[in-house]
Image (cartoon, helix red, strand yellow):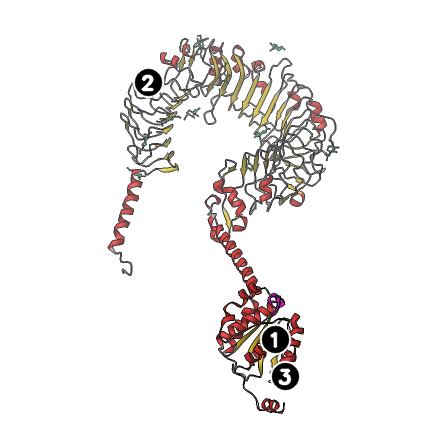
């Protein structure tokens, strides 16, 4: 055997083969396998072609940052099932005809950052399913040269960062009937003339022209064209140019127009009221002004905004909102990321039509809110999320100013305090307070006046639910989200008693240690229950019993070691989603029922891969789905063995009981060797008989044999047995060992007695062992001959034995006595005393 690191040749060869095959596979497929057989990432691997090791089922392939240079005929033949192909920055200069041959299912093609010089006229043939073509930064200088006219499934075409100079769409665009999105961002379009937009007629397109240095727009060139969205951010070199450009855009119809600048390329300075006046000649649903700096006051903005339904001001320096004219038709007003310090309730009160007001993402500035609204009677949505509000609210002052408010979002603010009292019935339906500290002055906020509330989010608001009446008054609540809070005693009791209409309840991350069986007893309509990330150690058997409509139950990330059979049985039948992952499961065989249940194929269990054993130690981190149930079946065989042993023991006990005497006798026989066997014969005969026949024995044997001449000595148990010694020892020692002969008095009683039968059997076997003793069988009257034959068997006929039948008649008795005496005389030796006694007689 090789020692000290030497490798023997027999081992070396297989290792070499192993290394070779590993090296070969990694060479053939050096890519990262994201989902085997389907998703491969081959970024930055200096590849110059498709790695031959990729399976032909690959659907999603990222080849970005390689060096492919030229895509030749049928380049992707190895991966015909592709749906997504990323060729970003692959140095591709040429795409030849039929390069994508056979990729009938390709839906997304990314060609970003390739210096394309040549595109074959049939380069994109076969890509009939292509929906998204991203050709950003690909040196495209004109749309005419793009061979995409046949891509009738195309929905999105991104041609940003190219060298396109004209907006004029070629003829073939009329075939791209599902095109929805077209981006010419950062191109070289500087002039738009009438006729350039002919291809856009009746299209409902989103057109991005941002970051083109537009110098000239022919008057009315957009007239009659309808856009879903038109983006013109960063297109004008100054505010004055924007003003002129907007004037010439008159007649434009758009759902949304986006104007403004970019953060680091802000060229719109000193905007004044007149600069946006062009908007008055357009037909817009929504205007978004993005990144307009150095406007601090809304009255610097054109009055034309008042004609537009929806006004959004994003990333501005606005510090003050001025009064709007009475006849303003703004329905929806939004200020996202501005510099307001307090909610301009008073100024906005003049907006009679206002339905939706959002002032968001101004966390550094917006801290104050005095609820002095009086007027926007129609306001339904008030979104003040993601600010720095520190407010003490009065429900009544807020709701009286905004009587139709249905939707209030105060999430992600600093601190909001509600008064404990609250009366009246308000129309509020949605209330979002998540991630805003709820001040504890006056204990928990009272919701008594929110009988119409439908949706309440108080997640991560630092509250601790202690009273039973925390949710009193919320009679119509359907959704309650309150993750990241806590409950008194870390226990869920009757807090949700009156929320009988609840559909969704999220109490994740609430430090719950226990959920009492009554906690959900009234939530008959509940569909989704999220108790993930708590500290539950076990589940009460009836805790989910009443949730008859439940479809989703999330219990992941608790401390459950198992789920008991009763809980599994009580799971609602409507359940479709059950997440038990990330619990420290105990995989010992005591929980085999649960382990078996998890293995049954079912769609119900989600994230089953993350259900792993925590104990016992040797199974730690084994997935439940990989757990070997047969390891628990050993205990089954153990049970079988135990049962069999038990049965054998019972059988043994029964046998011992039945053959007790025999066993005892065996023991005695075995002892016989040690004890001196030869004892002097004190008796002439040992009489074995049933105590029922005592009278007969006394009369016919004792009184006749022990009295007359010759005189015999009988061993009779009632007289001669030594007291204090076990009966069986007496039988052996006093009876058999001390007697020459054995007289068995066989009567019906004898045959019924277990003792007598035993004695008879001992006598028989004794006779066989110790040749000397012989048997005198005396059969009394009334004994069934057949039984006698069966009992005594051949012993009747042994030469040594005497077989006598006793009958109660004078003649027979005489005969019997003679025969008995001669049987007893056989082999008798006389003692001197006896001889003397006989002579004197
Ligand atoms: C790719 O090749 C370049 C030089 O040609 C080298 O610097 C780089 O390390 C190579 N990258 C890999 C991943 O092999
Ligand atoms: C993929 O390759 C297997 C053999 O490796 C072949 O049987 C199968 O037809 C191929 N599928 C396609 C779509 O080409
Ligand atoms: C394309 O997709 C269809 C259905 O989605 C599938 O049946 C077919 O096999 C796919 N074609 C290739 C080449 O994978
Ligand atoms: C189009 O490409 C540009 C540049 O890569 C990107 O900023 C923009 O988000 C893309 N548009 C879409 C809708 O993907
Ligand atoms: C325009 O397209 C958008 C989606 O891009 C759609 O929501 C809208 O209804 C369409 N409008 C018309 C008038 O077709
Ligand atoms: C607006 O249109 C007029 C008339 O066609 C033209 O003279 C002017 O230069 C255009 N302005 C811009 C900024 O294109
Ligand atoms: C609103 O009233 C002003 C005068 O106060 C008027 O100039 C303007 O045209 C009106 N706007 C609308 C949309 O009615
Ligand atoms: C409230 O605002 C936050 C942050 O903008 C948002 O995530 C949440 O969905 C809003 N809530 C509702 C009910 O719309
Ligand atoms: C629950 O509702 C009943 C009647 O709808 C009402 O009597 C009881 O006070 C309510 N209990 C709580 C705790 O809100
Ligand atoms: C339950 O809540 C946790 C944490 O809040 C979240 O990650 C999980 O997706 C939720 N489960 C469901 C089914 O929505």
Q: CA distance from mark 2 to mark 1?
A: 118 Å
Q: Residue at x 47, y 25 (%)?
A: 262
Say if disc 2 is inside 8 Å of ligand 4. Answer: no
Evaluate whether residue 86 shows in this view: yes
Q: Position of residue 200 (x, y in %)?
A: 43, 12
Q: CA distance from mark 3 to mark 2?
A: 146 Å
Q: Residue furthest left?
A: 9
Whether the residues at callouts 3 and 2 have beta carbons within 8 Å, the answer is no
- 548 or 21: nearer the viewer: 548
Mark 2 / mark 1, whichever is N-terminal:
2
Quarter assignment of residue 70: top left
Checking the image for residue 708, the label placed there is: 3
Q: What residue would you read off at disc 1?
A: 726
Q: Which residues are magenta?
A: 746-753
- Is residue 720 found left or right of 737 in the rendered image? right
Q: Position of residue 151 (x, y in %)?
A: 37, 18
């Amino acid at each position: 055997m090789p020692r000290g690191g030497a490798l023997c040749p027999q081992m070396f060869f297989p290792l070499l083969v192993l290394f070779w095959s590993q090296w070969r596979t990694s060479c053939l497929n050096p890519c990262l396998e994201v989902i085997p057989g389907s998703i491969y990432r081959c970024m930055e691997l200096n590849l110059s072609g498709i790695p031959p090791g990729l399976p032909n089922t690959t659907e999603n392939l990222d080849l970005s940052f390689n060096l492919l240079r030229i895509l030749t005929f049928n380049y992707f033949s190895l991966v015909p099932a592709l749906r997504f192909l990323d060729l970003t920055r692959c140095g591709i200069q040429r795409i030849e005809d039929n390069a994508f041959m056979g990729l009938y299912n390709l839906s997304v093609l990314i060609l970003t950052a390739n210096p394309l010089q040549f595109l074959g006229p049939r380069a994109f043939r076969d890509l009939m399913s292509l929906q998204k073509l991203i050709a950003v930064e690909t040196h495209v200088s004109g749309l005419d040269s793009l061979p995409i006219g046949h891509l009738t499934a195309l929905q999105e075409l991104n041609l940003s960062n190219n060298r396109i100079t004209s907006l004029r769409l070629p003829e073939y665009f009329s075939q791209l009937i599902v095109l929805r999105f077209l981006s010419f961002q950062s191109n070289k379009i500087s002039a738009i003339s009438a006729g350039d937009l002919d291809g856009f007629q009746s299209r409902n397109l989103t057109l991005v022209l941002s970051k083109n240095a537009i110098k000239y727009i022919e008057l009315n060139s957009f007239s009659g064209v309808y856009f879903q969205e038109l983006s013109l951010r960063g297109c004008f070199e100054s505010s004055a140019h924007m003003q002129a450009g907007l004037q010439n855009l008159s007649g434009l119809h758009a759902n949304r127009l986006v104007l403004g600048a970019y953060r680091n390329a802000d060229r719109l300075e000193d905007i004044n009221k007149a600069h946006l006046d062009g908007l008055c000649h357009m037909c817009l649903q929504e205007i978004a002004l993005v990144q307009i700096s150095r406007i601090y006051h809304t009255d610097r903005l054109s009055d034309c905004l008042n004609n537009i339904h929806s006004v959004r001001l994003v990333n501005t320096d606005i510090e003050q909102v001025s009064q709007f004219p009475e006849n303003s038709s703004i329905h929806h007003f939004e200020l996202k990321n501005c510099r307001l310090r307090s909610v301009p309730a008073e100024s906005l009160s003049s907006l009679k039509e206002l339905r939706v007001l959002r002032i968001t993402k101004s966390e550094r500035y917006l801290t104050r809110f005095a609820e002095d609204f009086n007027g926007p009677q129609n306001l339904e949505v008030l979104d003040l999320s993601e600010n720095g509000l520190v407010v003490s609210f009065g429900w009544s002052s807020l709701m009286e100013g905004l009587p139709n408010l249905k939707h209030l979002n105060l999430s992600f603010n600093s601190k909001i305090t509600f008064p404990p009292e609250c009366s009246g019935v308000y129309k509020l339906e949605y209330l979002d307070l998540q991630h805003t500290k709820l001040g504890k002055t006056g204990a928990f906020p009272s919701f008594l006046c929110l009988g119409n509330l439908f949706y309440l989010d108080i997640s991560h608001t630092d509250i601790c639910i202690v009273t039973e009446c925390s949710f009193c008054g919320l009679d119509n609540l359907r959704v309650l989200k309150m993750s990241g809070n806590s409950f008194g005693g870390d226990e869920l009791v009757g807090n949700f008693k009156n929320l009988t209409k609840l559909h969704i309840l999220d109490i994740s991350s609430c430090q719950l240690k226990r959920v009492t069986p009554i906690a959900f007893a009234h939530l008959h309509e509940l569909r989704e229950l999220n108790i993930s990330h708590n500290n539950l150690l076990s589940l009460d058997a009836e805790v989910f019993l009443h949730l008859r409509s439940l479809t989703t139950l999330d219990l992941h990330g608790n401390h459950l070691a198992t789920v008991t059979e009763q809980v599994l049985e009580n799971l609602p039948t409507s359940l479709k989603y059950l997440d038990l992952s990330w619990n420290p499961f105990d995989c010992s065989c005591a929980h085999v029922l649960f382990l078996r249940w998890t293995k049954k194929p079912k769609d119900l269990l989600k994230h089953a891969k993350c259900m792993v054993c925590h104990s016992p130690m040797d199974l730690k981190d084994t997935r439940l789905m990989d757990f070997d149930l047969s390891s628990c079946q050993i205990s089954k065989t153990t049970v079988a063995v135990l049962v069999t042993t038990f049965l054998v023991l019972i059988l043994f006990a029964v046998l011992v009981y039945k053959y007790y005497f025999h066993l005892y006798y065996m023991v005695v026989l075995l002892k016989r060797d040690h004890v001196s066997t030869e004892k002097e014969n004190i008796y002439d005969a040992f009489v074995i008989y049933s105590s029922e026949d005592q009278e007969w024995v006394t009369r016919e044997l004792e009184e006749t044999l022990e009295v007359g001449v010759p005189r015999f000595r009988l061993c009779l148990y009632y007289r001669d047995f030594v007291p204090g010694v076990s009966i069986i020892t007496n039988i052996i020692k006093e009876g058999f060992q001390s007697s020459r002969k054995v007289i068995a008095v066989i009567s019906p009683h004898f045959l019924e007695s277990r003792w007598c039968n035993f004695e008879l059997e001992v006598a028989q076997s004794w006779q066989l062992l110790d040749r000397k003793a012989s048997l005198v069988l005396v059969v009394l009257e009334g004994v069934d001959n057949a039984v006698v034959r069966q009992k005594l068997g051949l012993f009747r006929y042994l030469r040594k034995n005497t077989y006598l039948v006793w009958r109660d008649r004078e003649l027979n008795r005489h005969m019997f006595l003679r025969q008995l005496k001669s049987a007893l005389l056989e082999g008798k030796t006389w003692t001197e005393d006896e001889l003397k006694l006989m002579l004197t007689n």
